[in-house]
Image: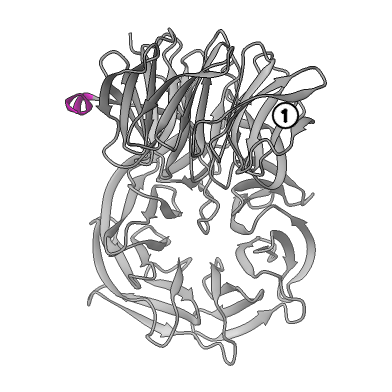
Amino acid sequence: MAAKAGAGGLELRAVIGFNGHVPCGLICHPDKEHVLYPLGCTVVIQDLGSKKQTFLHGHTNNVSCIVVSRNGVYVASGQVTYMGFKADIILWDFQRKELLARLPLHKGRIEGLAFSPNSLYLVSLGGQDDGSVVVWHIDKREAICGSPASARSAGNTTIVVCSSCRDEVFVTAGNGTIRVWELDLANRKIRPTECQTGQLRRVSTCVKMTGDDNYFYVGTSSGDVLKVNTNNRLMTDYGPRKEKFSSGVTALLFLKTGDIIVGTGGGIVALCKGSNYKVMKKIQVQGAVTSLTCTDQDHQFFVGTNACQIYQINYTAFKEELIAACHSEAVHDIVFPVGASDLFATCSKNDIRVWYTPENRELLRIVIPNVTCLAVDFMRDGKSIISAWNDGKIRAFTPETGRPMYVINNAHSLGVTAIAATSDCKRIISGGGEGQVSVWEIGEKTHKLGEVLKVHVSAVSCIKVKKDDRECVTASLDGTCIIWDLVRFIRRQMILANTLFKCVCYHPEEYQIITSGTDRRIRYWEVFDGSAIREVEGSVSGSINGMDITSDGAYFVTGGDDHLVKLWDYNEGAVTHVGVGHSGHITRLKICPENKYIVSVSADGAIFLWKFPDLH
């Protein structure tokens, strides 16, 4: 692939997504104008006013932790990597959005990061396989010293927090261990002291320092909060004694008033009075609370949850407002309505969502609990969204309200895996997990099975219908693509390859099709006689799961298990641009009708919008 060397980069325009599984992953910058959060291997910086996003690219795998220095100058982020390999910490310049240094030392995963109060040092904590804590000198960009994070008798350490006033002091906590550390810079050593908690045995989930540094609070999985004296390392109090927080305390936030905000694993956000943790006000959010971050001490704060939702909460009213939502499970399909690039629909486990691209916000969510939507399409007349579900049903909804219109029960025995509509809106073609292709006649008030085409012996992965509605092509995991006559309902051509076909596209002139799948090869075929015309290697590693072609047929895009979005010149069969940013397998992608951007969706729930390059 010589052409790849000269390929340009695709510019990321926006992302819809938030990895709510990262503890304290949502952070309000000290300038009170931006929030930062991880999504895949990208760190997203969003302006609170304009909602404009900028991105920090540099990690090669999922970002596992992120922290901002108190003066707002630096951002540090850590990642996950493969077992036994080094996991990078990246130090960034916030203002310039530039990578300043890579700090590789830990293996496997970076569990936690903390800046000292005057941004002299960065403390990092390795994951379970690494188990060490390291202090880095920020100006020199080098490690000063390191040590095993916990005693052999204790469990894993999962949290690191720096002191509020002293650069040389920090705290680590985890399963049955709470330690206060002091840095001895002259001798390049860090010395821990185990904190005494009496008879209490707890698994720490989060730690917060008081502003004066005299105490720190430890949230636990048992649903209580321990108060520890930083100076003598003794626990002085814990609570609530009677009614503990159910599902554990997962996040803490201090207010100037002395009150504490507690987030729990059960999705409760509670405002508690000082020492006895009496709950004054509380609200319920979706998912376990993983982040609490403050924009304005007396006004509002943000909540991030592991259901990948971000809420804004006003202190006085203590009412939640959902400001960002996204899929928390794999996204299986993405589709634009015909000729409209301001809207698109995605589908996942439990739901279909419709998005408004100028603001990247969710317009509609259609929820069907405990089933997974595997494919979705807009009817050409814009009157319905049709969808394929793993419970064997085809469901249709109104695009404006999401109201159910009709359901076709038992459409396929092993789930409906692919769906497409004819342009006259009178027929739906569906494919199933058992390999059957069904043609449904759709009337004003009726829907009935027209024909069943049985040739495929494995799941149908993709269906495309010709513009005149007289022909369609189906791709299957059985290694065949079949071109069907939709007038006589017979097989016109069968294409065979040693691959599980994942995607197929008609060239707009409809005399050729392109296919791809698990063998990573992109193949061009003649529709007329099913003969192979050309074959190019589409990816170095992993299956290609999605492809789409521009309306003029000059370019097409592919995406798959290598996490890359690739734009190809159709005639040359060469890559012109590559988009790097996803950390999950790309499942599907689409070029919007006016070639303004490319939308790619992935197995980690992320939706990326790429600017379509100016190729003239």
Above or below, comparing residue 575 to residue 151 in the picture: above
Percent x, y of residue 22: 50, 56
Q: Is residue 394 magenta?
A: no
Picture quadrant where residue 246 is located: bottom right
Q: How many marks?
A: 1
Picture quadrant where residue 270 is located: bottom right
Identify the residue shown where x is 22% and y is 77%: 187
Q: Nearer the viewer, residue 26 or 396?
A: 396
Range of magenta residues: 1-6
Q: Is residue 523 visible?
A: yes
**Viewed as shown, does residue 337 lie left or right of 7?**
right
Percent x, y of residue 123: 36, 65
- Which residue is tagged 1? 396
Amino acid type, mark 1? Ala
Q: Is residue 547 visible?
A: no
Identity of the residue furthest to the right in this view = 445
The C terminus lies in quadrant: top left
Above or below, comparing residue 145 to residue 102 in the picture: below
Percent x, y of residue 470: 56, 11
Q: Secondary structure at mark 1?
A: strand
